[in-house]
Amino acid sequence: MNETQVESWRKQSLSVSARLGALSFHRSGKFRVLHISDIQDGAKPSKSTATLIATAVDAARPDIVIFTGNIIAGYSPEFSATFCRRPWLEASSTNEDDLEHTRELVTAAYSSVLTPLVERGIPFAMTFGNHDVQCGLDADELERLAMQFTGCLNGQVSAVLPEQPWLERFACGAGTLALPIRDTDGHLVFNLALAHVGDYAAQGGYIGPSDEVLQWLRELPQVLPNHVQTMLFQHLPLATFYQALQEVDASTAYAVEGYRTFEGRYFVLDDARTEPSSYLGEGISCADDMREDMVLAQGGYAGVFAGHDHRNGFVAQARVSARALTAGADSIVGDGNSDEESLNEQRELLCAITPTCGFDTYGPTLAKRAVRLIEFDIRHPFNPRTQLLEFGDIGQRAKSSQAYTFGIERVDTTPGRGWNLVYKSGLFRKKH
C-alpha cells in the first residue's frame, strides 16, 4: 500500500488505534481486543463464520483482532495433496505445483475470514495451532500468506501502524510477537503478546512451546518496565487452567473427565473462581509439559487467553506458584486452603478459553459458536472485562452439513450475568 491508500484505510477504520496509527488506549481510557479461535475449516469457510466476525466487529469496534490458531483445518480433503499428519512425518507431496495450489487454497480461506476486517480497517495478528500446519505449509509460510492482507501486524514493522517499533524487534519466529499498548501520550501501559504454542507430541497428546519460544517468554518481562505486565494469547490452554475447576465424583451432573495427565479425574467449573456465563463442555487439553506454566508463574504475565477446546468458554482467576507446579498435577487443582506462607508466594493469573467460531467443526450448539470481546481499562489494565459474542445473539440461523454438536451441556455455571460491552446492543437480542 502507498501512503495515500494507508491514509484512506485509517480514515475509514472502525479501530481507534488504526486511526491513531498505533495500538493505544482511547481518550475514554478503553482498549478493545476481539479474540477469535478455531475456525478450523477448509478453503471455503462457512458463510456463517464470516457473518459472525463481521457483525461482532461492527458491534464491538475493536482496536485489534487476535486469532489464536486453527484458522484452517489442514486435514481438510482440499489440502490432501500436501497433507502432513504430524510434524515428524513427511508430507503427502513436496512438489512445487502441489504446494502452490495449497498456498492458493490457504489464501482463499484467509480471504474469507479476513475480508470483514480489511473492509473495516481493523488491524489483526495471528498465531497458529496444531491443525494449521497439517496443510503442508509451515508456520513461516502461513504467516507470510497472512501478511498479504492489509492490517496484518505479524512479522514486520507495520505500514498501517507505523508507531509500533517493537513488532520486528520483539518477535520470535512465526506467530510469536509482542504488541505494546500505550496511552494517548505514548507511555507504555501494558503488553499484548502472541506465542506459537502447541503441536502434537511424538509420545501422544500435545507439546508446549519450543525452547526458543520458551526462552522468549522468559525474557519478555525483563525488557518491559517493572509495572508493565503482559496478556498472552496462544492456541493451547495450560495445565494451570485446571485451577478454574473443582474436582468431583464421576457421577456428578455435567462433570467432564480431565485430559491425559488429569485422566481418570472428573471436574466442573469452580464457581468461586469463575466469572458469570462461563461453561465447560470438555476436558482442558493442555500439554503434558508444564515448563510454560513454570515460566508464567515467575511473574510478568497477567493472564492467558487460549482456544483449542471448542466446547469450553470460561474466564477464571487462578493462583499459580512454582512450588505447586513442581509438585505436579495433584497440586494444580487445590482446595484453596493454602497456608499464609504459600499464599504469599502465589500469583494471580487470568485464565480464559474462547470456544470455536467455526460452523464446520465440532463444538457447542451452532447458536453458541462465538468470538470473545475483551475490554481493557487504563485504570486497571490487567483486569479486563470480557464477554462472548455468540451467533445466536445475532438473530440468524446457521446451517452446516459438517458440524456436529452435543445436546447435553451445562451452559451457565455461575450466578448472575456477565458484561454487556457491545456498542450497538440493538444488534443482539440477549443481554449478557
Image: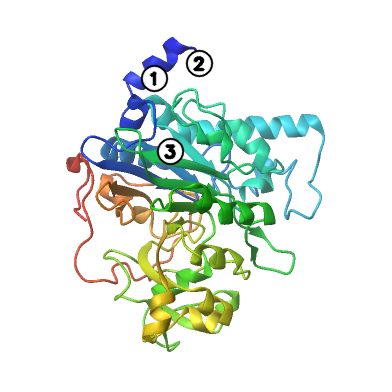
Q: In the structure shown, which secondary structural element does the residue marked by tag 1 occupy?
A: helix
Name the residue tied to disc 3. 47
Tag of residue 1: 2
Reading the image, the residue beneath label 1 is 9
Which residue type does callout 3 highlight? Lys
Q: Disc count in the image?
A: 3
Q: Is residue 246 visible?
A: no
Residue 310: image location, x then y, percent: 47, 59
The answer to whether the residue labelled 1 contacts the one labelled 2, judged by CB atoms less than 8 Å apart, is yes
Residue 85 lies in what quarter of the image? Answer: bottom right
- Mark 3 crowd level (few <14, some 14–19, many ≥20, 10 Å Cα): some
Is residue 138 found left or right of 307 in the rendered image?
right
Q: Is residue 263 left or right of residue 13?
A: right
Closest to the camera, between mark 3 and mark 2, is 2
Callouts 3 and 2 close, C-beta under 8 Å: no
Residue 190 is tagged as none
